[in-house]
Image (cartoon, rainbow, N blue to C red):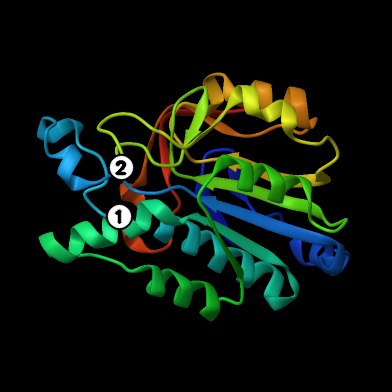
Amino acid sequence: MLLLLSGLAAAVPLTAQAQVSKRDYAREEYLILSGGPSLRTWEDYRLAADRHDRYWGNFIRSARIRIDQLRRIHGDAMQITWMVYRPGYESRQREDTVRRPEYSCTTAEIAQLASERKVKLVWFSTKDAVINYLNNRGGRKLSGFEFYGHSNKYCFLFDYSNDILGASTCYLHCLDLKRLHRGLFTRDATVQSYGCHTGEYMSGVWKKYTGHPMIGACGKTDFSAIKDNVTLPVVNGRWSQ
């Protein structure tokens, strides 16, 4: 039995294999969305205790851990799409080329991770691209949607502290959710945001417009748990939906 160490995303039930055998993978898709990292150039202006993203790969490694979990449960039959905010990783890549930190990454390495795990990698650079992908998948319903990235209780912040210190110029706001179609998800779909504070407001708006609940954090999420390459981010507070 595989444990998902992430609050409400608790344990895969003993009947998981029976459930897997009944899935129509050709008509379903699992979507994982990764926002971009902050730049150290900006974050180094903060006090040390308040700095974000010392490690570039918080939202990449956590997504990779989850993809590996899904592959162990469902095998290669599950259609998994991984959407990644490309401008954030391109700018961090340029910064790391100069700063030469101990841990860095390239967009080519992200593409390799996706290829090795047989997932469809979709780079995006605007919120419209995310909305359009959610709404248009050739009739396939989503059996899951998970977000790994910066957020507050009103927005997914795709480029937080990347373009501007402490701010975001590319984000998916609660007001944008009314553009999403109802009926996007299977009845048993897993929907969860691993961004900070989502459960304090945005989760409720998500359910209002999509008809499906979204688990979110009440409090901050802690990505340091992913260091063991097994554990998903945890919440310093509680999970809610």
Assign the C terminus to one quadrant of the image. top right
Do tag 1 and tag 2 residues touch (Cβ < 8 Å)? yes
Dividing the picture into quarters, in which one does residue 110 lie? Answer: bottom left
**Callout 1 secondary element:** helix
| Type of amino acid at the residue the image marks with label 2 | Asn
In this orientation, does residue 37 appear?
Answer: yes
In primary-sequence order, the first of circles 1 and 2 is: 1
Q: Quadrant of residue 201?
A: top right
What label does residue 100 carry, if any? none
Disc 1 marks which residue? 91
Image height of 166 relative to 92, above or below: above
Mark 1 burial class by Cα count in 10 Å: few <14, some 14-19, many 20+: some
The amino acid beneath tag 1 is Ser
CA separation, marks 1 and 2?
8 Å
Residue 162 got which mark?
Answer: 2
Looking at the picture, tell me which residue is in the foreground, 177 or 19: 177
Foreground pick, 169 / 101: 169
Q: Vertical placement of 139 versus 235: above or below?
A: below
Which residue corresponds to the image point at 29% horizontal and 44% vertical from the top-left? Answer: 38
The residue under the point 76% across, 34% down is 212
Q: Mark yes or no: residue 14 visible.
A: no
Horizontal and vertical percent position of residue 135: 77, 45
Please give the name of the residue rendered at 21% of the width and 49% of the height, measured from the top-left corner.
54
